[in-house]
Image: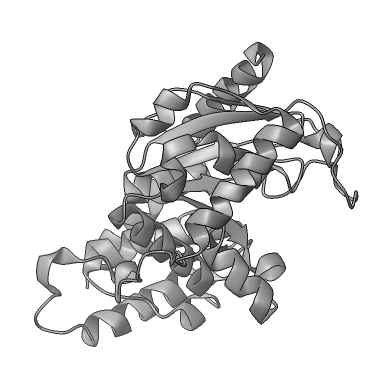
């Protein structure tokens, strides 16, 4: 394996990051590390073991790891050029038989108790599989989006924090099927990040709408918080458009720490899909601007 090829690849990935090409992963966050790992695997036709990659700190250590993986590489590559992170594929997010009537009752409650108003639903209906990005300040945000989706709600699935919603078996069963939700690792290791990608790929194959809260958690004051890393990366890897949305009124009705919702007016506004165009972090900035614009014009 020519080390010059690996060095050139890392130099390109390191452009705009604090880490130098000779010390590629020291200062990179988990998304950047996963991006680098996938690029190396694609370039050399290998799969790097997560547990070994986590300890890499220098170019020489990385080069040695890649050389070992190349030596163990099968003579015949996988058919169809399937990415390593997608093997084996995951089944689509499950939906229980009672999921549809449950979501129907939830929708009726949201419309009656909160007088839900929806604008721009046509953008969601015509989007196909996509990432649906919305602000997040309340546990009511998920039900509000589900109710606002209308006929498209059967395709909606929520990327929900695994460490919050999937720690107890009964809650996990409800989360995965009734709403439904898929387990999502927050700030996990490389193996966990691969699993997130595989869940998104399964949802894409099933034509699902994946709700993605880019702030990473609920806002305490109801304002839009800075986005976590990953939105542009996941959109690029999966080729998914991003539908921006704004949810109004949920922070007043059920702020973080409250135990029972107050009745009132809730609004959900959907905007036109934003297509990935190779602009990197600019995709997140574009989605953020459109979300804020939806919030300013919401009824």
> Which residue is at 22% across, 85% downward?
71
Please state the horizontal and vertical placement of residue 188, each as a whole percent of the image: 60, 67
Of the 4 image quadrants, the one containing the C terminus is: top right
Please state the horizontal and vertical placement of residue 137, each as a whole percent of the image: 76, 40
Q: Is residue 286 above or below residue 235?
A: above
Viewer-side residue, 290 vs 255: 255
> Which residue is at 37% across, 65% downward?
92
> Which residue is at 38% across, 50% downward?
208
Q: Could one spot residue 184 in this view of the protein?
A: no
> Which residue is at 49% across, 23% downward?
271
Is residue 108 toward the left or the right of residue 261 in the image?
Answer: left
Q: Is residue 26 above or below residue 121?
A: below
Viewer-side residue, 160 vs 52: 160
Please state the horizontal and vertical placement of residue 171, each as a whole percent of the image: 67, 72
Of the 4 image quadrants, the one containing the N terminus is: bottom left
Is residue 237 toward the left or the right of residue 94 in the image?
Answer: left
Q: Residue furthest bottom?
A: 72
Viewer-side residue, 145 vs 280: 145
Is residue 58 toward the left or the right of residue 90 in the image?
Answer: right
Is residue 63 toward the left or the right of residue 252 in the image?
Answer: left
Please state the horizontal and vertical placement of residue 165, each as a whole percent of the image: 67, 66
The number of discs equals 0
């Amino acid at each position: 394996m020519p080390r010059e090829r690996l060095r050139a690849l890392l130099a390109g990935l390191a452009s705009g990051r604090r880490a130098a090409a000779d010390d590629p992963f020291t200062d990179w966050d988990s998304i950047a590390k996963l991006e680098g790992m996938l690029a190396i695997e694609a370039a050399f036709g290998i799969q790097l073991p997560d547990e070994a990659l986590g300890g890499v700190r220098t170019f020489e250590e990385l080069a040695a790891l890649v050389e070992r993986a190349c030596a163990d590489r099968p003579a015949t590559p996988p058919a169809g050029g399937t990415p390593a992170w997608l093997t084996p594929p995951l089944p689509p997010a499950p939906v229980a038989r009672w999921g549809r009537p449950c979501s129907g009752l939830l929708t009726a409650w949201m419309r009656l108790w909160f007088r839900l108003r929806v604008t721009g639903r046509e953008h969601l209906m015509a989007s196909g599989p996509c990432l649906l990005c919305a602000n997040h300040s309340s546990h009511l945000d998920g039900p509000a989006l589900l109710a606002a989706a209308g006929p498209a709600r059967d395709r909606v699935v929520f990327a929900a924090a695994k460490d919050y919603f999937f720690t107890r078996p009964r809650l996990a069963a409800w989360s995965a099927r009734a709403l439904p939700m898929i387990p999502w690792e927050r700030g996990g290791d490389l193996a966990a990040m691969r699993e997130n990608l595989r869940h998104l790929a399964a949802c894409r194959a099933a034509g699902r709408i994946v709700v993605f809260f880019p702030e990473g958690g609920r806002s305490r004051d109801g304002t839009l918080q800075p986005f976590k890393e990953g939105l542009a990366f996941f959109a690029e890897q999966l080729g998914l458009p991003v539908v921006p949305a704004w949810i109004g009124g949920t922070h007043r009705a059920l702020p973080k720490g409250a135990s029972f919702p107050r009745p009132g007016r809730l609004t959900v506004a959907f905007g036109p899909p934003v297509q990935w165009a190779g602009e990197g972090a600019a995709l997140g900035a574009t989605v953020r601007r459109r979300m804020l614009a939806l919030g300013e014009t919401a009824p």
